[in-house]
Amino acid sequence: MLSVHSCPLGKLGGRDTGGMNVYVRELALELGRKRHKVDIFTRTHQPEHEELMDLDGNVRLVHLGAGDDDEMPKVALYVHLQGLTCGVENFRAREGLHYDILHSHYWLSGLVGRQLGSGWNVPHVTMFHTMGAAKNRIGLGEDETELRIESEREVALGCDRIIAATERERDELARFSGAAPDRISVVPCGVNPELFQPVDRVLTRSKLGLSEHGKVILYVGRIERLKGLSRLVEALAMLGAAAPFLMIVGGDEHSESEVRSLEDMACKLGVREHMTFCGRVAQEELPAFYSAADACIIPSYYESFGMVALESLACGTPVVATDVGGMRSVVRQDVTGYLVRDNSPSLLSEAIARILSVEEDRAQAIQTRRSLVAGYSWGNIANLILREYQEAFDSYPARVSS
């Protein structure tokens, strides 16, 4: 497995850390539990980890050096990809290993995977997680480079199989990269139901200093324009005196300017006292935040899937989300939450007001929401991925010709 630009153990909520880190780590660990051996290759970073780490009996994490700047932008890593490719091959040769499948994550890893797969004569499966062309179409923030756009096409056309998290992503991949639709398989993202489960709401609200607040809503993720947080702040203001208290989880030093912008907006709109920035939170602490909230809000302009929705529902907390990523398959109106057409403040405020006004049997509602996301357990997702690996292995040209 290749995740060259971002370590699966990286702290979540930062510029280059999020759902993909969780995906790589959880999928690898589940494959290990199913008695498959997995090596994950990534780049060295701060704080430093050992070069070779055992994540469990069958899963190892290998850190490889690439450049001197731990904080370099992702695209700057491009010039170091050949060194990373050589580092993976040197490790393989030193350990005397033969890999059956390569699974790359993100376009930078895909370029490494394409070269290694050809040299090792093994199938290369890739997952992009986000597409540069799709992000550029939205037009928020800096445009993704032509280097990324062309590299994604190169990887998509040169790999043996592509995993998309949603049918929508499959269609985007076919449209933007030219990859044949029959080489793109849809496998959703997953959730760990043993970690993400309900925690006593009164206790968690007390620990988080929320006892004096009435209704509480939650945002979890990176703090950047693409996530639509400014629209959520505007929605909060539209609720007036009925505005709930908003917890914002995520962000790092790279998001300080965006945080200041959101704070300024909240002050001008008169809702600064209705919100708090919690910063980064370790994944094992997230269930307390989900459980303390009356609803989790996903106001994004774009998501490749939106694993936060699965985590929230596994904790029994309903979701208000824009119609992005995999939300159509996860959010069931009036049951697991509300799906809104877009993230206009009026639609968000209306859905938030509606979900906060619902009176329900909390215990029954929690059980229902958890049952509806049970099929997204990493064990089930790993089985689907293994099926894709097997099909890629069986149809690989080297095996056909033999």
Image (spheres, helix red, strand yellow):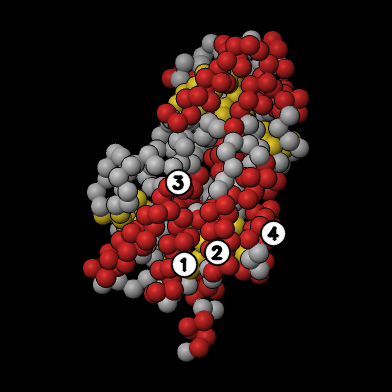
- Residue 38: percent from left, percent from top: 37, 62
Q: Identify the mark at residue 114; answer none if there is no mark.
A: 1
Mark 2 lies on residue:
154
Q: Mark 4 or 2 closer to N-term? A: 2
> Which dot, 4 or 2, sits closer to the camera?
2
| Dot 4 amino acid type | Arg
* Residue that appears at 55% across and 64% down: 154
**Label 1 or label 4, whichever comes before in sequence order:** 1
**Residue 249 numbered tag:** none
* Secondary structure of residue under mark 2: helix
Q: Is 107 in front, or is 11?
A: 107
Q: Residue at x 53, y 31 (%)?
A: 223
Q: Nearer the viewer, residue 94 or 367?
A: 94
Above or below, comparing residue 143 to residue 208 in the picture: below
Instruction: Identify the residue shown where x is 62% and y is 45%.
Output: 135
Q: Position of residue 212 (x, y in %)?
A: 53, 11
Q: Residue 171 is drawn in which quadrant?
A: bottom right
Q: Earlier in the sequence, mark 3 or mark 4?
A: 3
Q: Which residue is mark 3?
A: 74
**Which residue has dot 4 on it?**
175
Work out which quarter of the rendered image holds the N terminus and state it.
bottom left
Question: What is the distance, in whole Å, between disc 1 and disc 4 at their CAs?
Answer: 21 Å
Left or right of 95 on screen, residue 123: right
Between 112 and 190, the one lying in front of the other is 112
Could you classify mark 1 by the number of other residues whose Cα lies within 10 Å: few (under 14), some (14-19), or many (20 or more)? many
**Alpha-carbon span between mark 3 and mark 4:** 24 Å
Q: Position of residue 97 (x, y in %)?
A: 30, 71
Nearest to N terminus: mark 1 or mark 2: 1
First-in-chain label (3 vs 1):
3
Q: CA distance from mark 1 to mark 2?
A: 9 Å
Residue 236 x, y percent position in the rendering: 66, 19
Q: Are marks 1 and 2 in contact (CB under 8 Å)?
A: yes
